[in-house]
Amino acid sequence: MKKLLFAFFTGLFCTLFAFSSFGAEEGLKVVDNGSTEFFLGTDLKWIKKDINETLVNGIIDAVKSKTGVELPQSIATHQLKDKEIIIGYIKDTTTGAKKRQEDEPGVYSIDLDLVGPQGWAIFTTAKRIVILTPESDFSTATSEAVYYFLINGIGYDPAEPAGETVSTLTIPVINKVKSLYLDIDHTVGLTVDGTDIGEFTIVYPAEASETVADLAKNLRRVLFALTGRVVNITDDSAEAVEHEILLGNTNRGASTTYSTLKTENGNLIIGGASDEGVVGALELFYREHLDIVGKTYVGDYEDVAITGITHEGDVFRQVNELPEYTTFLRHTVASLLGTTETPCFSDSATADKLVSAIKATEPAKGSTVYLVNNTASYCSCSACGGKTEAFFSTVNAVAKALSGDGITVATLAYKETLTAPSFALESNVLVYFAAPDMCLGHAIDDETCEDNKAIATALKSWSGKARVYVLDFSQDYKYYPSTFPNFGVINSNYKFYTENANGVMFVWCKQGAALEYGELRLALINRIISESIADDSFTAEFKEIIGELYGQDAEAMDKYISAFTENAAEHFTIDTKPSELLPVVCDEKGQYDLALAKELYANWKSVYRRHETPTEDITGINEVFFGQNYINSDYYLTLHSRTQFTEWLRRNIDALDMYDVTRELAGVKE
């Protein structure tokens, strides 16, 4: 049995989160002086599954191995015992199960939406320990929870030989949640104006857009993962209750400013004049008050007491991936009009046609529409000679016509229209400043770089003209998975954005970024946003992050990144080829200068001697970076970097020469 249990558990990995205590203070004495009053309760139908029977017997065997006492079993859906360890989702389909739900509501069931598809929880009550998954058939999630319980509760490792038995076994309080939605290893308390967050109900508009409805659900998930409190959620057709989190423009009151985040009359208000504003307000709440950036908790685990928030206005946004950018690529001005030709922006009829086309789509009140010309094609008539003036005049006219419906018009400052017009834009216009051709070998405010100097000047020109968000492409290298050594400018550029724009959105290539230090880029940006890093301490902070991520391989990672950065070209963009970014010189005789390549190869060779096999089971690149377990294997992350090295080499060496070059790097002699 022990071997079977260990074989099933081997390779499972989990990110663990704490759950607030249900009442037990110091633990439960499951075995006392060689006897027990506890039962192991399961669902009879559920236990018939072979793997679930293995898990049940695993707990019985663990307790018996530690104490010599065998836990008796009960049918949890039929019998309510005074003292129990319960495994599985207890459905309230029988009298016994219903009585459980009535006596201790919320203890025996957990919403799948709260934890994700393979989430789980362990609850300790005054007389019970409940090992719970959203569905009883989730064997993988249940096995993770049981294995955690064996190790941390019973103190029993299936892989280790059994020790001497004890007559008394006290299981400590365990309130743990594995959640898909937040990276945190134990929960914190949260109050709003002195009221526990669990007393609140999230309220969103009954006619909310999909964006706002999703935000409400996400807030509920995040609050659960952070605090362990299950917050009720409803739309505003329900009667008001004493404490509410009002998300979006509910019938309890609409926001008139771009974003609103405040406490008022016992409620928490997270709103905005448009969906964009609501998103911004919620991100502000996460970042400034809950210490959450993206999916990462960056706080110190102290309880949070929120009171007296009064923000109304713009917020500085940050996202790790930008779905809106793909919208920009699709919805051009021409496509809105059903043509492929860019219209004349100096013709007033163009604005009228665009307004009609937009209204025909029946946009929801408070939603965002996109008015974009990213084709670099403009009318050549004399009146359109000033492309910026003509284009944004049309944007203004459309925005003014739609302002009564609370609609935001999002547009793009791009190429010919990168610089602001001479006039201010309407208040419901949102400008995304996009300069993907920016030099990433220099900071944006480095005046020695003529390209960046022009871009910085263009961004400054928008001051007082519109609400502007920068689309930062510095993480979107075209030639993944080859190394892109632009880490040194990220901090400086972020500071420049905060001084000259209302927000920044980092555009990620989801597949590519994971192959090119994606985990390092995410950690670095989270650190920069959550802290104010001085330029003179950036290098030290960067090294610290490398150390935290890569453990035993940190020195090799730092050495590789430093060598690549020091030798790379001074001027490069996201479109610079690896062979131009850091070329391998080949002389007239066809001999390659492999000095740097040999140095980098030796670096990885020394690292891989310490990695014979992965220490954890990693199923795919997306899960490593973008799933809840994206930072968990030194082996896998080191493998990424070696792949970057070989990809850079491949793009520099002629395919016919690759065999000889690799033999030379490896020191293979004829």
Image: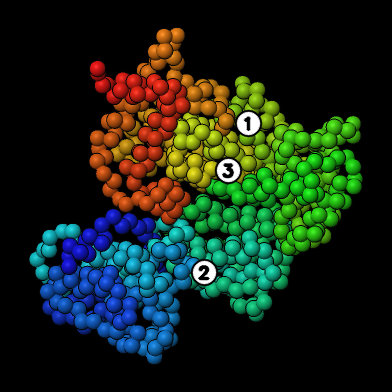
Q: Which residue is depicted at the point 83% across and 41% down?
A: 343
Q: Are marks 2 and 3 in contact (CB under 8 Å)?
A: no
- Label 2 and label 1: CA atoms lie apart by 46 Å
Q: Which mark is residue 300?
A: none
Whether 297 is drawn above or below 170: the answer is above
Residue 397: x %, y % from top left? 85, 48
Three-letter amino acid code at disc 3? Val
Q: Amino acid at mark 2?
A: Ile
* Amino acid at circle 1: Asp
Query: What secondary structure is marked by label 3?
Result: loop
Q: Position of residue 637 (x, y in %)?
A: 37, 41
Q: Please identify, in this view, whether the residue under mark 2 or under mark 3 is nearer the observer.
A: 3
- Figure quadrant of residue 385: top right
Q: Residue at x 46, y 27 (%)?
A: 651
Residue that label 2 marks: 197
Pointer 2 local density, CA inside 10 Å: few below 14, some 14–19, many at least 20? many
Residue at the limit of the structure toward the bottom, as seen here: 95
Q: Nearer the viewer, residue 451 or 257?
A: 451
- Judge whether 197 appears above or below 126 on screen: above
How far apart are labels 1 and 3 at the CA level? 13 Å
| Number of numbered discs on residues | 3
Measured as percent of width and height from the top left, residue 317 is found at 61, 49
Neighbours of disc 1 within 10 Å: few (<14), some (14-19), many (20+)? some
**Alpha-carbon span between mark 2 and mark 3:** 33 Å
Q: Is residue 198 left or right of residue 149?
A: right
Q: Secondary structure at mark 2?
A: helix
Q: Where, by quadrant of the figure, is residue 118 drawn? A: bottom left
- Residue 229 in percent (x, y) is at 47, 70
Locate the C terminus by quadrant. top left
Q: Which residue is mark 3?
A: 507
